[in-house]
Amino acid sequence: MKRKTVAWALATALAALLGAQTASAADDIVIGDIDDLSGNYADVAGTGAVEAIKMAIADVGGTVLGRKVTVLVADHQNKPDIGASKFREWADQNGLNVLLGGSNTGVSIAMAKVAAAKKIPFFALGAGGASLTNEDCTAYTVHYVYDTTALANGTATTIVQAGGKSWFYLTADYAFGTQLQTAASKVVEANGGKTLGAVRVPLAASDFSSFLLQAQASGAQVLGLANAGGDLNNSLKAANEFGITKTMKPAALLAFITNIDSLGLQTAQGLYLTTGWYWDLNPETRAFGKRYFEKMHKEPTMDQAGYYSATLTYLKAVKAVGGTDSDKVMAEIRKTRINDLFAKDGYVRADGVMVHDMYVMQVKSPQESKYPWDYYKVLKVMKGEEAFGPMTGLCTIAGK
Amino acid sequence: MSEIFGIPVAVILGQLMLGLVNGSFYAMLSLGLAVIFGLMGIVNFAHGAFYALGAFAALIGLQQFGINYWWALLLAPIAVGVVGIVVERLLLRRLYRVDPLYGLLLTFGLALVIEGTLHQFFGASGRSYPVPPALQGVFNLGFMILPIYRAWVIAVSIVVCFATWFVIERTRLGGTLRAATENAPLLQAFGVNVPLLVVATYGGGVALAALAGVLSAPVILVTSSMGSSLVIVVFAVVVIGGMGSILGAVISGLALGLIEGLTKVVYPEASNIVVFVIMAIVLIVRPAGLFGRE
């Protein structure tokens, strides 16, 4: 009896797996999304990004060149090996044509290597690491939305030029945090500011107040927050509680609208940040925000809007070249300007950076906010070339 | 004498004060663990999850039912304590006769289930719980600015720790509890309802975790993972204090908070491992812990 039950359970599980595998027929255009669906970045991209991809497919009518567009979704759990092996599996067995995803720089680098080996276009979305278009660049990688260079150029330049000359950094003690701090301090110093100090905070610390008091004791004008997600939230909450935001200007080197929504405007007000997109920029972005809100009951993040745009960009290129040949599609993508609700006159550079305008924002006070999700005021629109800077030469396939 | 080893005295005092606040949380959480282990022999890995559940209970109470902070301090631990009682009756009691390792595995699995459920419903980014109006503002201590709420945390923690110690070590009820751990069958022969004592102990220990959760809600963002990062440190605190020793849990909780605070000034990168370094040393020198019986 027991053995029979086990056999049934196994059969059901296998059938479910098979169902997922055979969803795409041979001539479908297959878009893969490998992302963090359950961890720290799940609110920033996650299921909202899947929804955005589906919205883009619906907007092209569900088919391109008479071929049905289908989506495969997997959770990489922030593990590079899982992301890379899933990508390989889809490429070998499911006729994958393009991969979107990332959120995590480590996983994205691993997936970019597979993209190069399998010659399948990979749109890296939500991962900050600028190395994706430098040391780790490939001919098939497109880095969408933002990178650490653009974030530092946006936030740091604006604050230094407004008089915030001396900086103290609260830095997450891992690669992403130190890269972000290095990028920001370079910009600060190039603009005539100086770094008074930094404290490296262990990841996911339970209390940030000790580190914040050290920042305050430094006498710096600006509190540079080179951390992200929950760490950013908790450091801002404590900075507010200890009255540090009254004497120092807080500058988030990476913040999403979900951070602000979690913290509330009372705590987050006055914060400087840089974003690749905001739902309340113009009628077009607002219309997208409204459509998205009806499904997800939240406004989209810059990443989620980026997934929509990247899907459209890929499908437009497929339509233009009349097929899914990766090299032809990539050539078309590099050649054509991107004009949609996410980017105006954006373009993909030889090193893979999708160059587009970035927005330097300040978080509104509760009094300034007039309706739900009215969180940012635009301080500066930064031209793509200024934000992403010139090519470094580190990407050997792109030249200088 | 305004500097010690090149660090201003004011900075050291400030860090010690913050260390005391963090130590208060460690003490309250390790207290619950020590009570559960001491009286039931269960290594309660779900303690961090119950702590998170306490914070979420306060948050849901405020947002859905308008229950304020003060009522949450009372109601959230009761609600979570009831969950603990259900867990004990349905699951844990089946494991008393087998190796303690099974209890550890069960509670670890339970922690993953609770955290996963919270994650599913509330997402990864967490929510903000406001500081109650009566406790807003700051004290200016001269050497630092101390938010009133943090001072309140220290006060509550001291009262709760002392009350728990008093009940277990100095009252008749506590005496019966301790007797149950020494020789349960004999006590049952005297007509004492031992299973009831055990379930009350687990419910009480879990309620203590939930109380710590409510207290921490205004300090840090309420997230599904808030307990998992803390519970490992708290286990180290219990090991250092001596498994099952209530006094040991409280004293080592506060002391480790202070040591961690000092580490944050001297060498911040090590602040999340200093507790474990001390644990390793204690295990080598006194394997039963500082206050444990050999």
Image: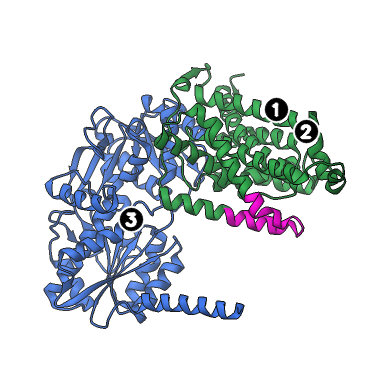
Chain colours: A blue, B green
**Are the residues under marks 3 and 2 on the same chain?**
no
Q: What element carries label 2?
A: helix
Q: Which residue lies furthest to the front in this view?
A: B191
**Are the residues under marks 3 and 1 on the same chain?**
no
Q: What element carries label 1?
A: helix
Question: Distance between the Cα atoms at labels 3 and 1?
Answer: 47 Å
- Residue type at mark 3 is Ala
Q: Are marks 3 and 2 in contact (CB under 8 Å)?
A: no
Secondary structure mostly taken by the magenta-highlighted segment of the chain = helix
* Residue at 51% across, 51% down: B115
**Can see residue A353?**
no
* Residue at 55% across, 45% down: B227
**Are the residues under marks 2 and 1 on the same chain?**
yes
Number of other residues with Cα within 10 Å of mark 1, as a class: few under 14, some 14 to 19, many 20 or more: some
In front: label 3 or label 2: 2
Residue B101 on the magenta span: yes
Q: What label sits on residue B173 in the rendered view?
A: 2
- Residue type at mark 1 is Phe
The residue that mark 1 highlights is B162
Question: Distance between the Cα atoms at labels 2 and 1?
Answer: 16 Å
Number of other residues with Cα within 10 Å of mark 2, as a class: few under 14, some 14 to 19, many 20 or more: few
In front: label 2 or label 1: 2
Q: What label sits on residue A45 in the rendered view?
A: 3
**Can see residue A235?**
yes
Number of other residues with Cα within 10 Å of mark 3, as a class: few under 14, some 14 to 19, many 20 or more: many
In the image, which residues are magenta? B87-110
- Residue type at mark 2 is Leu
Of the 4 image quadrants, the one containing the C terminus of chain A is: bottom left
- Residue A362: x and y in percent read 26, 36
